[in-house]
Image (tube, grey):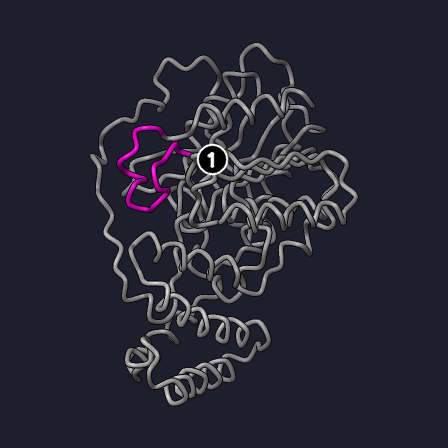
């Protein structure tokens, strides 16, 4: 959700996060006594050295064997509440509370290696996180208090990429909801994200255009090569060639040996390399269960138009007959009602999750199940 990767000269633009009363309770945080059952649970992922993942299963009191949704967090290390402490918001806590109060069971869990979950977060890729979701599905199938034929996935940001990865090869997934999910490859997501973030920070168009020339070259190298030494050699050559060929470019002066070394350091991330190479269409084109895709019009991290279009195109190829795609006016990446959608606003907004978006999600599920 918040793993911002800004490569090359735009990485010199600093982002200052306003810490907004980290101990302050937000208005939408649930308060006890809860009107439903909340159970701490654990499940094993046999595909990842049998690590134990920890989570919470919330069950409505008045519904026998309810539909159940698994919440899948976005990028970056997060606990079961999808909490980012510097923003002091817990979107999955609010979402699970709302859905469970409306008759839908919810399983949310700590990312591997985070909070109570075992495993190594830093060494995991998107595909590894997908295997954790599959383990969650397997766990729910052992329960006798949920409808195991109505297990769905709700993924936010990178979780909205993970959900189709799982659904595309698992007929047991009853539905998927993509909240700011990606519809284009990781290179385009990162390139458009960094450009929009820089625009919001006041960067000039000329600088952005020049930076984009470099990112296009670099991402192409990563996507078309697998040997790390080859990638490093080609990136180094590309940056130096750009500097030599474009002496008047506003970013050429920033291309120094130190800067190149810093950029190569970013490439140590297995997650980043995998994300740049992943194509959502490969999974969307095989996803045939009902899909709801939502994105905020002011989302700068996963830009709505290109990503929703990519999702639509992939699901059309899949022949999916139950698809709802909606751009929600005025909402940011966290589905808060926002002014600009910038990162700096996240902590300043009291609202954790738009009531409009919550109602759309709830109504869409209940209409089908």
| Residue 301, horizontal then vertical, whole percent | 44, 50
| Residue 68, horizontal then vertical, whole percent | 60, 27
Name the quarter where the C terminus is drawn. top right
Say whether residue 270 is left or right of residue 287.
left
Quadrant of residue 140 within the rendered picture: top right
Q: How crowded is mark 1: few (under 14 residues within 10 Å), some or many (20 or more)?
A: many
Residue linked to disc 1: 55
Visible in this render: residue 261?
A: no
Q: Is residue 50 above or below residue 322?
A: below
Say whether residue 218 is left or right of residue 322.
left
Question: Residue at (55%, 25%) from the top-left corner?
Answer: 360
Point out the residue furthest to the top here.
Answer: 62
| Residue 121, horizontal then vertical, whole percent | 43, 55
Q: Nearer the viewer, residue 141 or 362?
A: 362
Point out the residue furthest to the right here.
Answer: 319
Say whether residue 269 is left or right of residue 171.
left
| Residue 76, horizontal then vertical, whole percent | 41, 51
Q: Magenta region: which residues?
A: 334-351
Question: Residue at (57%, 76%) from the top-left corner?
Answer: 226
Question: Residue at (45%, 23%) from the top-left corner?
Answer: 355
**SS label for mark 1:** strand
Q: Nearer the viewer, residue 45 or 175?
A: 175
Q: Looking at the magenta stretch, what is its main secondary structure? A: loop
Q: Is residue 165 above or below residue 37?
A: below
Visible in this render: residue 127?
A: yes
Quadrant of residue 104 within the rendered picture: top right
Q: Which of 13 and 149 is in front in this view?
A: 13
Q: Is residue 335 above or below residue 317?
A: above
């Amino acid at each position: 959700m918040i793993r911002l990767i800004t490569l090359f000269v735009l990485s010199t633009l600093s982002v200052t996060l306003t810490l907004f009363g980290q101990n302050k309770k937000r208005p939408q945080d649930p308060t006890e006594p809860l009107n439903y059952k909340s159970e701490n649970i654990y499940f094993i992922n046999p595909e990842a050295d049998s690590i134990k993942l920890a989570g919470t299963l919330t069950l409505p009191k008045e519904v026998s064997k309810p539909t159940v949704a698994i919440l899948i967090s976005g990028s970056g290390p997060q606990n079961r509440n999808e909490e980012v402490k510097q923003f002091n918001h817990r979107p999955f806590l609010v979402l699970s509370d709302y859905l469970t109060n409306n008759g839908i069971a919810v399983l949310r869990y700590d990312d591997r290696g985070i909070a109570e979950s075992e495993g190594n977060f830093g060494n995991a890729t998107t595909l590894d996180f997908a295997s954790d979701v599959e383990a969650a599905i397997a766990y729910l199938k052992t329960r006798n208090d949920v409808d195991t034929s109505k297990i769905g996935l709700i993924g936010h940001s990178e979780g909205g990429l993970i959900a189709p990865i799982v659904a595309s090869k698992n007929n047991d997934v009853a539905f998927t909801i993509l909240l700011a999910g990606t519809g284009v490859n990781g290179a385009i997501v990162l390139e458009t994200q960094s450009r929009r973030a820089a625009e919001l920070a006041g960067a000039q168009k000329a600088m952005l255009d020049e930076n984009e020339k470099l990112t296009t070259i670099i991402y192409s190298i990563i996507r078309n090569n697998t040997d790390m030494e080859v990638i490093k050699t080609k990136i180094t050559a590309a940056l130096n060639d750009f500097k030599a060929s474009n002496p008047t470019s506003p970013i050429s002066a920033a291309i120094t040996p130190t800067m190149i070394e810093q950029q190569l350091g970013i490439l140590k991330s297995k997650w980043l390399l995998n994300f740049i190479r992943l194509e959502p269409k490969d999974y969307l084109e095989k996803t045939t269960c009902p899909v709801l895709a939502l994105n905020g019009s002011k989302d700068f991290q996963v830009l709505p138009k290109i990503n929703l279009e990519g999702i639509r195109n992939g699901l059309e190829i899949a022949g999916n007959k139950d698809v709802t795609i909606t751009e929600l006016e005025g909402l940011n990446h966290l589905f808060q009602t926002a002014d600009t959608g910038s990162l700096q606003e996240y902590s300043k907004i009291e609202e954790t999750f738009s009531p409009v978006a919550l109602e759309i999600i709830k109504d869409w599920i209940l209409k089908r199940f």
